[in-house]
Amino acid sequence: MYPEFNRVNEYISEAKSLLNTQRRFADIFQSIVTRNKKRVAAKYVNEKGKIKSYKYKVFELNVKTYAYAIGRKLKNIEGNNVVVLKHANAPAWPELFYGILMAGYKPLLVDARTSKEGTENLIRQTGAIGIITDDMYLYEIKKLNPEELLEMKGIAEPKWENEVIFCSSGTTGDVKLMVFNGENFCHQICCSLKMPLETKDIMYPKSLGQINILAMVPFHHIFGFVAVFLWYTFYGCALVYPASLTPSDLQSVCQKAGVTHVYSVPLFWDSLALQTTRKFSLLDQGKQELIKKMMAYNIGEISKEEAGKASMSIVRKTVQKNILGSAVRYCISGGGFLSTETLRTINGLGYNLYNGFGMTEIGVTSVELSSDVKVRLLGRIGKPLNGVEYKIVDNQLFVKSPTIHVREIIGGKERKTEFDEEGFFPTGDIAEVDEFGAYTLKGRQKDVIINADGENIFPDELEIYFKDLPHITHLCVLGIAKNSKSHAEDVALVLETDNSITDDDIAAIEKQIKEIEPKLPHKVKIDATYLSKGRLPLANNMKVKRFVIKKAIEGDTGEYLPLHQKQQVKKFAGFDKKTIEEILVPVKETFSKVLVLPAYKIEDDAHWINDLGGDSMSYVELIKELQDQFDIAFKEETLGVMATVNDFVYEIAQLKKGNK
């Protein structure tokens, strides 16, 4: 056991006090503000780029002010007691959350990016009577502005509600909503009780250093709510709010605020690993070798003697200065599959990155806690946390835990949470357990691809082989049905590109895919590659919604183009195919240049403004470019009327014919 164990264990044991209460949200809040009044509650970036902070004493006062204002604003409104909280992470979010509960209302946590239509659908399905948001929309229910609420000074008698509603990843149709109560989250806090047995770095008293955790994962998401907001406010730590989620702002706030803990989804860690690797490749050979040795030393591949200068802390801190700073002690990835390559890179940089597991339905139920870097690199999700049990049935992970939601709302109708005969909840995740009782996830049961040989293929394992493809912003691997009579599926790779990609780049990517294929496990072959005309749909946990893409491809909606597919050239009366193609290609190239869009995203009949996002200024540029290119002058009466590639092709063909 490490020397500081007793101090860390005593600090974590504060959670036990919740078990002697009524286990309500009111008890969690009271424990926070009673024990932590003098501790820093929030750090944020002000308008001048300076780090500002305030303590839990101010946090408590703000919660009571919000509760008073919310109660006054909604006092005479009849109906359900649900209030929508649609707000991005900010110091106000935790205060609004507890303010809603204290005023006697049930928070419905909604992604701040949700469309008006999606928000209204959630309002209808829950019967919400009010919404707290700073968005631009008008709703049929009472809308409350957070800044205005804080200006209403007063203290009301607490009426404490004890339930909160979380959304599933969708916002259209009959959405699945999960209802949790205060007891669920009292037990969720107590899940931390055995953590000191494994590590001193995930949670520790101020005598061992100030914990500053980056508030990056959205709090409406169960991972952000539990692992950042709930756990770290209960233990009186400081939540650090970046000005934005751009790499420069994240780097800046981590360094200025001394961020010690960074929890995020695999997409963030994959992106950070890729960007860092690319930056290193631009350095001179000597620096590259030094960093390579440092990373090998940090993951235990070479000894201190073999690393030499690269093992020195000053080298690590110098490298970290341009990434997340050198104060970071603990990192967790949750919400999806984390590749071995990313684990090696982030841990190699000296950031201890661990893998965790949770779901909206069950909360956070495990995280790898071993301080052994070689164990971290295995990508395990660790053992079940305190009070949680796991079992595997037919390769599927089942969970028994007092943190599981108490009931569901689907299509406006409530139903009890369903368990098996032993009280376990089916997660839908495929898992393995080793001889030490630690678990590893293989993928989602519904995402498994079954090929013609009946072999199970896990998409997550394949995606990591393609993540370094140039110009690719997102990608996914999924199964596409071969035909209606067979259960076998083709393995499809779907790519979302940046807008600078050219036809030559696409050809190069196709070649790279062919070169990668022989390296894929189980001799898997990519049967089809698609290019997405828009952005790939992402769930709240930032994972690609494979089922949405699968449905679109199988339904031939045209949203995803096979790599080799060419648009059919429209026939124009009086012109042969060759003449039209000779005009079409350069016209589309000019559209692509002016719009800064890849040619494959430009349909021949897509409208310049309505479909392609052009405007009047860029239209003028387009006209000039095409007139110079074809040595023509468009008739004044056609300007503004021509709006598609086909419009311009036909008009240019007419003008060229008339000039002969």
Image (cartoon, rainbow, N blue to C red):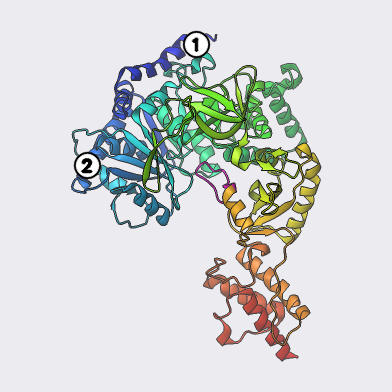
Label whose residue precedes the other's in the sequence (2 or 1): 1
Span of residues in magenta:
536-546
Q: Is residue 148 left or right of residue 481?
A: left
Residue occupying the point 60% across, 38% down: 445
Q: To which quarter of the image does residue 505 belong?
A: bottom right
Give percent across and percent down for residue 21: 30, 20
Can see residue 536? no
Judge depth for marks 2 and 1 and give the one in front.
2
Q: Does residue 65 sit above or below 29 in this rendering?
A: below
Residue 537 magenta = yes
Q: Does residue 439 sit above or below 589 in this rendering?
A: above
Q: Does residue 648 sit above or below 118 in this rendering?
A: below
Q: Amino acid at mark 1?
A: Glu
Magenta stretch prevailing secondary structure: loop
Can see residue 415? yes
Mark 2: secondary structure: helix
| Residue 4, label in figure | 1
Q: Is residue 290 left or right of residue 170?
A: right
Give the mark count: 2
Kindly report the distance in space between the C-alpha atoms of the residues bearing marks 2 and 1.
Answer: 46 Å
Residue 649 magenta = no
Q: Quadrant of the N terminus?
A: top right
Q: Amino acid at mark 2?
A: Gly
Q: Quadrant of the C terminus?
A: bottom right
Mark 1: secondary structure: loop
Q: Give the camera-side residue of 51 and 331.
A: 331
Q: Which residue is mark 2?
A: 71
Q: Give the camera-side residue of 23 and 508.
A: 23
Residue occupying the point 70% across, 83% down: 653
Give percent across and percent down for residue 176: 44, 44
